[in-house]
Amino acid sequence: MSENKVSNNLKTKVDGRVLIIERIFDAPRDLVFKAYSEPEHLANWWGPSGWQTENRQFEFKPNGVWHYCMRCTDKNQGDFYGQESWGKAVYHEIVVPEKIVYTDSFADEEGNAVGDMPKMLITMEFEKHEGKTKLITRTQFASVETLQQIMEMGVVEGTASQYSCLDDYLKEIQ
C-alpha cells in the first residue's frame, strides 16, 4: 500500500489495484448523496471544471444504466475545447444515503464500451462526519498496470477538479 497523499482537500492512497480517494464536503450526507443520485443534480456539477455533462440515460437502481457525455465548454482549455468524453455506468448496489456501487467505463455515443479503455468497479461510501460528509471512493481496476495507466492520465487531478465543482454546487443548493 502506498503512502497517503493529501492535496486539494483530497486524501489518496493506492492499495494494490485499488485507488482510494477521500474528501470531506461541508454539506449533509443526504444532500451529497442526492448530488449523485438525481440526474438534475449530476448534470449541474459532474465532470472537471470547464466541462458540461449531458445525461443521455439515467436509471438509478440496481442494474440501471447511466449513459452520459461530458463536453469541454471552456475555450481556455485549448485542444480540449469542444471535445466530448462519453461514459457508461451500471449500478450494482444502492443503499440510500450510504453507498453506491457501480461499474464505470468509457463509452461511445450509443453506450458501447470503448474496447481499449479500462472498466472500473467503483464503491462510494457517504459517511456522516462532524456535521459534514466524508466521501470515500474505492476504484478497483483489473490490474496494477491498468491503475497506473489511469493515474498517468490524471485521474487524481480530474477527481480533485470534479470535487471542487461538486463543492461549489453544494454551496449553491444548501
Image: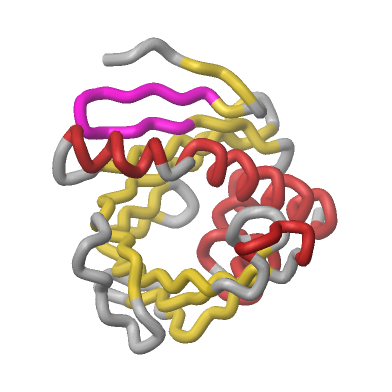
Question: How is the rendered protein coloured?
Answer: secondary structure
Residue 155, given in percent of the width and then of the height, sits at: 46, 42
Residue farthest to the top, as pictured = 3
Quarter of the rendering containing residue 44: bottom right
> What residue is rendered at 30% in x and 69% in y?
90
Residue farthest to the left, as pictured = 143
82 relative position to 90: left or right:
right
Residue farthest to the front, as pictured = 79
> What residue is rendered at 41% in x and 75% in y?
66
Residue stretch rendered in magenta on the structure: 11-21
46 relative position to 100: left or right:
right
Up the image or down, 87 lies above or below 36; here it is below
Q: Nearer the viewer, residue 60 or 88?
A: 88
Asked whether 12 falls inside the magenta stretch, the response is: yes
Residue farthest to the bottom, as pictured = 110
55 relative position to 111: left or right:
right
> What residue is rendered at 27% in x and 38% in y?
147
Give the quarter of the figure containing the N terminus.
top left
Up the image or down, 165 lies above or below 128; here it is below
Quarter of the rendering containing residue 163: top right
Residue 13, given in percent of the width and then of the height, sits at: 39, 22
Q: Nearer the viewer, residue 73 or 16?
A: 73
Asked whether 53 falls inside the magenta stretch, the response is: no
Count every numbered label the image shows and give the total: 0
Residue 92, given in percent of the width and then of the height, sits at: 25, 62
What is the magenta segment's predominant secondary structure?
Answer: strand
